[in-house]
Image (cartoon, rainbow, N blue to C red):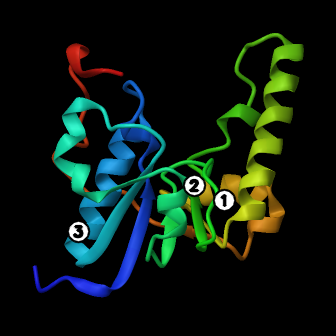
Amino acid sequence: MAGRDESFRIAFDGGPWERPPHSMRRVLALLMDAASQAGWSCELWTRTALQPEYTSFANLVRQGPAAWRDSEADVFWCPGLPDKPSSRPVVCTIHDVNPLLPDGRPWPVRLWRRIRFRATINSAIGRSLQVVTATDFARRSIEEAFPSLCNRITVVPLYSDNRIRRADAGERD
């Protein structure tokens, strides 16, 4: 890799590495790797300490709102939906519209799930300069469900990586 591009600094929402295992952990790892390969300087914005397996990234952590305000990041990228205040431009990631799809649950549960999902997405896109997703199919589905995003959504594929594989039973979240 050529030298680091200190002129661009990206802050990632470190939340997935604060909490017990869930799928956003892998997404954040891929984003961090991609930013590193691009030579960007990175920060992780967190509310609490990282889970033990991520302590090697402790030097990148900016914990709490005061630290986020003092950040020199150019953009704040969330591997999911933003839940931290930011005076920086925000990029949020919408992976799919699955909560809007039929799933065999009773209709009152589905209706409540749809209402909550729409409210969450509308709040996130209202705070975001840009929205990204990983596939063209997801982009089309999101644009169909949220037409206001037609000019603000970009596909950023998760690149091929040896960590993208079927997890063994002991590795599953």
In the image, is 119 to the left or to the right of 84? right
Q: Residue at x 24, y 14 (%)?
A: 169
Question: Relative to residue 164, is residue 22 depicted above or below?
Answer: above
Q: Nearer the viewer, mark 3 or mark 2?
A: 3
The x, y position of residue 68, in whole percent, is: 50, 62
Residue at image mark 3: 36
Q: Nearer the viewer, residue 101 or 94?
A: 94
Residue at image mark 1: 140
Residue at image mark 2: 137
Amino acid type shown at disc 3: Ser
Q: Is residue 145 visible?
A: no
Screen quadrant of the C terminus = top left
Question: Relative to residue 173, is residue 126 depicted above or below?
Answer: below
Q: Nearer the viewer, residue 149 or 139?
A: 149
Q: Residues within 10 Å of mark 1 (few under 14, many from 20)?
A: some
Q: Circles 2 and 1: CB distance less than 8 Å? A: yes
Amino acid type shown at disc 2: Phe
* SS class, disc 1: helix
Question: Relative to residue 156, is residue 144 depicted above or below?
Answer: above
